[in-house]
Amino acid sequence: MIFQVARQLREAGVLGMNRRNADFIMPCNPRSLFPLVDDKVLTKKLASAHQIPTPLIYHIITSHGDIAALEGKLGSQNQFAVKPARGSGGSGIVLVMDRTAKAFITQSGEAISREDFTHHISDILSGIYSLGGLEDRAIVEALIHPDPVFAAVTYQGVPDVRVVVYQGIPVMSMVRLPTRASDGKANLHRGAIGAGIELKSGTTVTAVHRSQVVTHHPDTGKPVSGIQVPYWDSMLLMAARTWEMTGLGYIGVDLVIDRERGPLLLELNARPGLAIQMANREGLLKRLERIDGTPGTIFATPESRVAWAKEAFKKA
Amino acid sequence: MLFYRIVWLGYPLLPTAPGQVWQLLINAHVKDEEKEINLEIGLPSEHAGRMLVEERITSGNLNFALLRKGPDRIGVWAGRAGQEGEEVAYRTTIIIRPQRTPKAQPPILGKSLPPAEKDEQALAERLAERWNNLASKPRIRAVAATVWGEWGPNPPAEGDLKKWKHLQEKQGPLKSLLLLLRAAGLQAQVAEGLRLVEGIRTQPLIWIEVWNDKIWEILWPGTGEIDRNPASFLPLATGETPSLRISGGELLDIRWSLSRQILSKWNLHFERIRRSDRFLDHWSLFRLPAEFQGTFRILLLVPIGVLIISVLRNLVGFPTFGIFMPVLMALAFRNTGLAYGLGIFAGVLLVGYTVRRGLDKLHLLLVPRMSLIVTLVISCFTVLALIGSKLGLREFMAVGLLPFVILTMVIERFFVLVEEAGVREGIRTAVGSAAVSVISYQIISWEPLQLTLFIYPELLAPVAAIQILMGRYTGYRFSELFRFKTLRKAP
């Protein structure tokens, strides 16, 4: 029975954790390049050098002494996000909607006292949220005002679009929709919904919520499929260009769509999760193997890669 | 190398000496007034199912001599002990192999029956007539039953029974039973010795051995109960020989201590290999001083432990806190025992989590906070050790061997996990870690494996090979079969 299930998964082209690590991440992502994506400050610098837009940085806090200076730097800006530069899985991120004399109001409406807020930043600096527990920096950046396209299927928070890119070619994509359970965060393991996006048209197809296939958002009750993602072609192109930008062969590109600025690169992930397969109800392995078997000419430019991917991976 | 050691150096293929190993220690304190003292103590003897290694005698000023009397061995300490007294001791390691039952010889007991009056003898023979047509086994049962007054279907005459009761009172249960057994034509003798359980006794047990045509059965004179497992007893003296006799002085104190030994199994190989001149015997880990051998026994198991963890994580998909935490916990369980170890783990984690929750309000920075949790963990250990010593629980006192740094990290990570991913995820990972520790503990504490690795450290090479294979295993994890179940192609 076990071997039968394993065989069926292999026939469906499902990529497992071990295979992902051994055959894709290790050969394609040289260790030396990991800091480029693990440290969001470096990612942002690199992105701006490649003309890929990212959320505006207000301030970077490097030492505990800098914390006091934060409020001055913010000026009249009352809305911002605080993130650990080397955080993973969305941990340590606080989204501030408003400032009052005593407290910061987070996106979920909770008030955080100044003292707690300072403590949180010093936690970030101590490296609690960082990969490997190294000392870290805290990024204070512009809050994203999400495009209303996903408003009906989002509970608070900011939905983001994840594109898995292999050798510069977009392979599979999904949009991650925050729910009440995920506390406004767009991470699937916290309970966000992942809705697969058809690569050619850019419309959402099936969705997964905690390994269950769903058709409607659990909080808003609206259908999650059939939504056309705006700026789809430019988003695919941004994702494809991260190959030239980082040199990493197998990455997850996280994009957000801001109401005013359009698609922005939020972060890159050198160990993208496997849940995207559930969101698309399709295995990654067949697509990855197909890329391995293609002639090198299509890899020449990001445009040619996107064009090839849209034809190769369109839903019949 | 392995092959060479087995074939040319005659290493055992299955290296554990099966059976039990016991350490016997007899301590006596004697003094005399004017005369020379003569102390005789029954010592254990060797036969096929029982092996004695490393006998050691302490005799102080006294002279020691070993006497053999039939199957028994008697240690004789003689000389002047003086007013102050003298400590004498006998120490040995006994290996019992229950599956190799001693080839029991039918006894050659002289007709010298216990001294009894003519009429007592006649009474016993008259009483024993009723069992004449029984086989020896049921006959033993029938005689034993008389101890609690059971005489079978046709009890003897009232007068005989009265006389017998009188005899029992006069001679005591031991002698009267022996008399009756012999009158019934059974081979029986008195034996003194110890039951093979851990403990200290100030006098040996006394029982009757009865031959049932195959083995010696053990009969308890007080209750008439029959023990058919002579391997669980250690006779020190049989027949007419008492296990303890002293003349010319005074015995102030004597103790027989038995303790179960595990280490001594190693000594067997140790002894052999130490005496050998062959090259690989020279370079064996047995050449290390004993205290370092213990360290290596554990060190050699760590690769196996981490191999198990990589199997459980990459093949099965258990969630664990870190890579090394489960194997270090498993090593600690060797000292605390599984149940206590897990209990302590859960307890410390719970206390740590509660305190960590409280600390969250104080807004301590990371490093001081972690150091505070280390302090807390060690305080927990101290309290547990103190409780352990009050209750006499060695398992609690061994708590100091738990990896406290790892426990601290586990508390912190558990807290962060619970905060971020919810209680369910936190408990899932904690239980996963505990399960992996238990599984690795079970494998690590398998003694044949320990000894195999210790004798053949080159086995680490195949272990490494399996680790490399695990590293290249790119198939699905067992847990992924469930995770991606919905994605499989309909057959």
Image (spheres, rainbow, N blue to C red):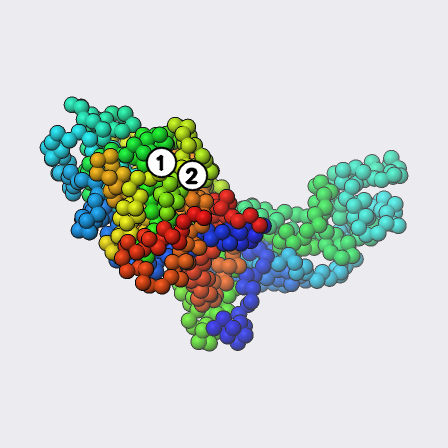
N-term-proximal mark, 1 vs 2? 1
- In the displayed structure, B416 sits above or below B203; it is above
Residue A158 in view in this figure: yes
Give the image location of residue B44, x and y in percent: 60, 58
Q: Residue furthest top?
A: A101
Instruction: Check disc 1 and report its element: helix, strand or loop.
Output: strand
**Residue type highlighted by circle 2:** Ala
Q: Position of residue B488 (x, y in %)?
A: 51, 48
Residue position for label 2: A207
Which image quadrant for residue A61? top left
Q: Residue at x 49, y 61 (%)?
A: B451
Residue B417 drawn at (x, y percent): 36, 38
Where in the figure is residue B421, as x and y percent of width and height? 37, 36
Pointer 1 residue: A177
B401 in relation to A213, above or below: below
Q: Cβ–Cβ below 8 Å for labels 1 and 2?
A: yes
Residue under the point 25% across and 37% down: A258
